[in-house]
Amino acid sequence: MDSPSQLSPPASPSDPIDQPPMVLPRGVYVPMPAFFTADDEIDIPATQRHTARLLAAGVTGLVIHGSNGEAVHLSSRERRAAIEAVVDTVRHDADLAHGPVPIIAGCSAQSVRETIALCREAREAGATHALVLPPGYYRGLMNHEDIARYYEAIASSPSALPIIIYNFPAAANGVDLNSDLLLRLAAHPRIVGVKLTCGNTGKLARLAASAPPGFFVGGGSADFILQGHIVGGHGTISGLANLAPRACARIPELFDAGRIAEARSLQHEVAKADWVAIKTGFIGVKAAMPMFYGPSEASCAVPRLPFTRLEEGSEAFDGIRRGMAGLLEIERRLAAEAAGGK
């Protein structure tokens, strides 16, 4: 597989401003971690291995530079290198018979100008969509009209990618967008979805019922995949799917097949494991990589300073092992079933 430095830029933008943006299909989207080498550079081989692993598991799309991906710890050069590594792997490994794989890049900044610049850089690297938090630094001086102008100005820029709103109050100084504002923004032709990490399933239900056709409404964690699917949501964008992509995808499949009790039982197991991931954040997800994918992925468990890896034998590490043991068994079983069916 070519290294990103050997790649030529995409022949043309994936979503020209004068054409309708790519609609995000229903399914599981995975906010990938950032992986680092021993000398603290972006680990391109690890990034590409994990991308290929997720594609083989049948995920719908990939998210780079979200909260799970340590975006705030990366330079502009590093962001581009990671996107190009994922794009290259998708180009080589994705089964495009079912359509293109959305590659969503986190492009959040406090100003319209800088956010557009991040979108332009992500587009040049091959991303298809941008995931954008609301600005929160001056929260006390902003109202919903200010936030609406922020998103509408970005989405209307010829340089910007199609926008997915990232409603994550904990990462935006408490800014929590209500369903009225989100429905207003959903009317913009280049604002194409929302990730609801607020966990508000009532909001999710209102958006699923009233947003325009083609507007993606997704939950932001794996502990309410079934709940979101029941009320008409379109999928999940969940960090736990880095570890258990098949289990996350299996929940809506069981529900759609009318196997409600099985879907509920699997959601219970996923929610237990996701609570561990929620409490430990991206550090816990990274620590679990060798548990799920073998000791060869030990380097993937290292976050960037000021954070440090959870050491085996520590109370936190043992808590992750115990809390995710049931899900690990389920994911291994589903992977074996998939391999046997080929």
Image (cartoon, rainbow, N blue to C red):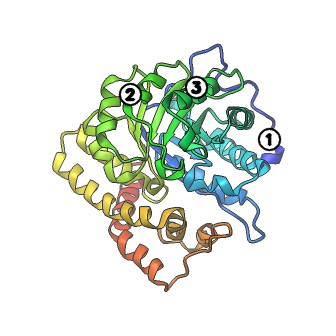
Outermost residue, top side: 18
Residue 312 position in % (x across, y down): 52, 82
What residue type is disc 2 on? Asp
The answer to whether mark 1 and mark 3 are in CB contact below 8 A is no
SS label for mark 3: helix
Tally the marks: 3
- Residue identifier under label 2: 180
Residue at point 48%, 40% (across, down): 60
What residue type is disc 3 on? Arg
Q: Note whether residue 32 is visible.
A: no
Residue 262 higher or lower than 231, as above or below = below
Residue 226 higher or lower than 188, as above or below = below
- Residue identifier under label 1: 7
Of residues 134 and 27, the one drawn nearer to the viewer in this rendering:
134
**Distance Cα–Cα, label 1 vs label 3:** 36 Å
Residue 149 higher or lower than 76, as above or below = above
SS label for mark 1: loop
Residue at point 16%, 50% (across, down): 261
What residue type is disc 1 on? Leu
Q: Residue 149: give its label.
A: 3
Give residue 6's quadrant in the image: top right
**Distance Cα–Cα, label 3 vs label 2:** 15 Å
